[in-house]
């Protein structure tokens, strides 16, 4: 499971970089893959990292709509960049990746928030993703 943990962290970093640079996450992903092939000091981008980033990119508009709709008191653009991208990744994996247990997704995203964001962020991330978990069947139906 350490490989999946690393894959999630790297997917988050790619989403974060794309947000910060104002470029698409698939562009950043391609840059990371190219760099890992050209520079042996760069670790390879795992298949699961690619799946997470590509899956998010495919549903980015819907994911941002959900985050905006359910995050009480926060607009997407006012949200800390780290939190916004943890939520994007977590929403994708929670709602659309069936092979990952919901509790694992929640725990991993809370851990990312603890590592990379503010003291308040873990509870914010947990609360919003917990809401998505509860609404998952209806959110998936709405997406169909």
Image (cartoon, rainbow, N blue to C red):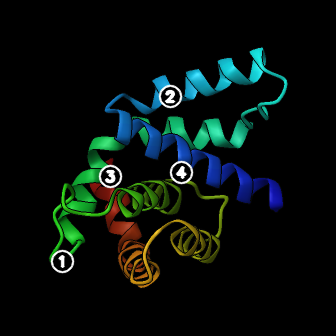
Residue at x 33% of width, y 47% of height: 144
Dot placed on the residue nearer the N-terminal end, 1 or 3: 3
Q: Measuring from the top left, give residue 65's x and y in whole percent.
A: 22, 54
Q: Measuring from the top left, give residue 46's x and y in whole percent.
A: 74, 37
Of helix, strand and loop, which one carries label 3?
helix
CB-based contact (under 8 Å), mark 3 and mark 2: no
Calculate the distance from the C-alpha at mark 4 to the C-alpha at mark 2: 11 Å
Q: Relative to residue 70, is residue 112 drawn left or right?
A: right
Mark 4, residue position: 12
CB-based contact (under 8 Å), mark 1 and mark 4: no
Of helix, strand and loop, which one carries label 2?
helix
Q: In the rendered view of the protein, which quadrant contains the N terminus?
A: bottom right
Of helix, strand and loop, which one carries label 1?
loop
Q: Quadrant of residue 127?
A: bottom left
Calculate the distance from the C-alpha at mark 1 to the C-alpha at mark 3: 15 Å
Calculate the distance from the C-alpha at mark 3 to the C-alpha at mark 4: 15 Å
Q: Relative to residue 69, is residue 13 drawn left or right?
A: right
Mark 1, residue position: 72
Calculate the distance from the C-alpha at mark 1 to the C-alpha at mark 4: 23 Å
User: Is residue 7 positioned above or below 125 on the image?
Assistant: above
Select label 3 or label 2 by which is in front: 2
Dot placed on the residue nearer the N-terminal end, 3 or 2: 2
Dot placed on the residue nearer the N-terminal end, 4 or 2: 4
Q: Measuring from the top left, give residue 19's x and y in whole percent.
A: 36, 41
| Residue 28 tag number | 2
Mark 3, residue position: 63
Select label 3 or label 4 by which is in front: 4
Dot placed on the residue nearer the N-terminal end, 3 or 4: 4
């Amino acid at each position: 499971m350490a490989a999946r943990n690393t894959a999630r962290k790297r997917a988050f970093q790619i989403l974060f970089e794309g947000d910060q640079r104002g470029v698409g996450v698939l562009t950043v992903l391609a840059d990371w893959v190219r760099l890992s092939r050209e520079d042996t000091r760069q670790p390879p981008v795992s298949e699961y990292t690619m799946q997470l980033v590509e899956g998010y990119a495919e549903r980015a508009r819907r994911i941002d709509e959900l985050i905006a709709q359910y995050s009480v008191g926060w607009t997407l653009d006012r949200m800390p960049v780290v939190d916004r991208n943890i939520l994007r990744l977590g929403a994708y994996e929670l709602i659309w990746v069936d092979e990952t247990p919901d509790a694992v997704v929640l725990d991993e995203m809370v851990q990312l928030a603890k590592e990379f964001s503010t003291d308040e962020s873990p509870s914010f991330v947990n609360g919003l993703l917990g809401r998505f978990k509860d609404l998952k069947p209806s959110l998936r139906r709405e997406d169909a």
